[in-house]
Image (spheres, rainbow, N blue to C red):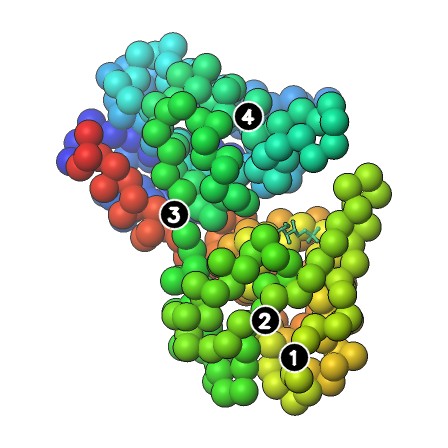
Amino acid sequence: MFENSVVIAGPASLELARRISQNLNVKIIEPELKIFSDGESKLRIPVVKNKHCIIVQSLYPPPDRHIIQLLMLIHKCNKDHASKITLVIPYMAYARQDKAFLEGEIISIEVLARSIENFGADEVITVDIHKEVSLSYFSIKIKNVTAIPLLADYIKNKASLEKSFIISPDAGGIKRAEKFAQLLGLPTLCLEKKRDRKTGYVSINENIGMEVGGMNAILIDDMISTGGSIVKACEVLKKQKIGNITVLCTHAILVNNAFERIISSGVKEIISTNSIPSICSKVDLSLTLSNMLVNANKSD
Ligand code: R5P
C-alpha cells in the first residue's frame, strides 16, 4: 500500500515521524537542517521523484520557522515531481484567527491554507483544529482527527474518577468537553470565559452555577498556550473549595513558564498528546495518525 512512499520528518516532529514510519513500515527521510545565526533555516533532502511524500511537521512555536520549513519541504517534493504530497500537521498554527474579530484583522488560517496549497500539497491530516470552520479555508482534502477518545482512555486507566466532573474553560469548548464526559460517564460544567479582544485579558465568571465543594475537576481544552485560561479557571474553582484539579489538552504549547504557573495554581497534573513535544506529552498520536494515512490511501 505504501510501497512507493516515504515519510519526511519535519524538524519539528522527528520523533512522531519516526513512529509513523515504523507503524507504516515506510522508509524515513530525516532532512539535514542548519539554522543560521540570523534564525533562517536551511534544509537538504534527497531527490523524491515519483514518491508519495508524507511530510510530518507540527506548527508549534516558533510557528513561523516551522511553517517556512514545511513550505520548503513541500516545494522540494513538488520540484522533484513527487507523485503525491500528504501533510501530517498535528498542531495547526494560526487557527485561532479564523475570522476578523475586529475590523481589519487578517484571517491568518486562510493565509496558511492558501500557502500550503499553492506550494503544491495534495492533502492534509491535522488533529483537533481549534474550530472546524478553519477547514473551510482549505480547497485541498483536509481531515481533522480528534484526540478526545485517546485522552479519555488515558485518564480512565490512570485515575479514579470518583466524585469527578468535566469542565470546559469556555463556551467554545463545550462540545469537546461533552464528548469527553460522555466517554467517561461524568457530568459536565462549562465556565463563562471572556477575553478582551484588544488586550487579551481573560476573565471568568465566578458564579459557576453548581455546588462543587469536595469534588474533583478535570479540565479539558484543545490547547494551552500561556496557561492564562487554566490559571483563571483554577482561581475560580479553588474559591469553591474544589478537590483535585487535573488538566488535559490535545496541544500543550506552554509558552514562557505556563507549565510552572499552572502547577503552582493548584493543578495536580497536566496531560497532553505528543502533537507538540513537552513534559506533558503522555498520549501518543502516532497510531491514530498512521491509521488516518492508511484510510486516506485506501480512498484514493
Ligand atoms: C481558546 O479559545 C482556546 O480553546 C484555549 O482556551 C486558549 O487558546 C488557551 O490559551 P491560553 O493558555 O493562552 O489561555
Q: Secondary structure at mark 2?
A: strand
- The disc placed on residue 145 is 3
- Give the mark, 2 or 4, whose residue is nearer the N terminus: 4
Residue under pointer 2? 189
* Residue 175 on image: x %, y %: 49, 58
Which residue is found at the position 67% from the left and 50% from the top? 225
- Give the mark, 1 or 4, whose residue is nearer the N terminus: 4
> Badge 1, how many Cα within 10 Å: few under 14, some, many 20+?
few
Which residue is found at the position 70% from the left and 73% from the top? 208
Which residue is found at the position 46% from the left and 70% from the top? 181
Give the CA distance from mark 1 to mark 4: 39 Å
Q: Secondary structure at mark 3?
A: strand
- Give the mark, 3 or 1, whose residue is nearer the N terminus: 3
Q: Secondary structure at mark 1?
A: loop
Q: Name the mark nearer the viewer: 2 or 4.
A: 2
Residue under pointer 1? 210
Compared with residue 263, is residue 87 higher up or lower down, i.e. above or below?
above
Compared with residue 298, is residue 119 higher up or lower down, i.e. above or below?
above
Mark 3 and 2 residues: CB-CB less than 8 Å, in contact? no
* Residue 180 on image: x %, y %: 45, 66
Mark 1 and 2 residues: CB-CB less than 8 Å, in contact? yes
Q: Name the mark nearer the viewer: 3 or 2.
A: 2
- Give the mark, 3 or 4, whose residue is nearer the N terminus: 4
Give the CA distance from mark 1 to mark 2: 8 Å
Q: Amino acid at mark 1?
A: Met
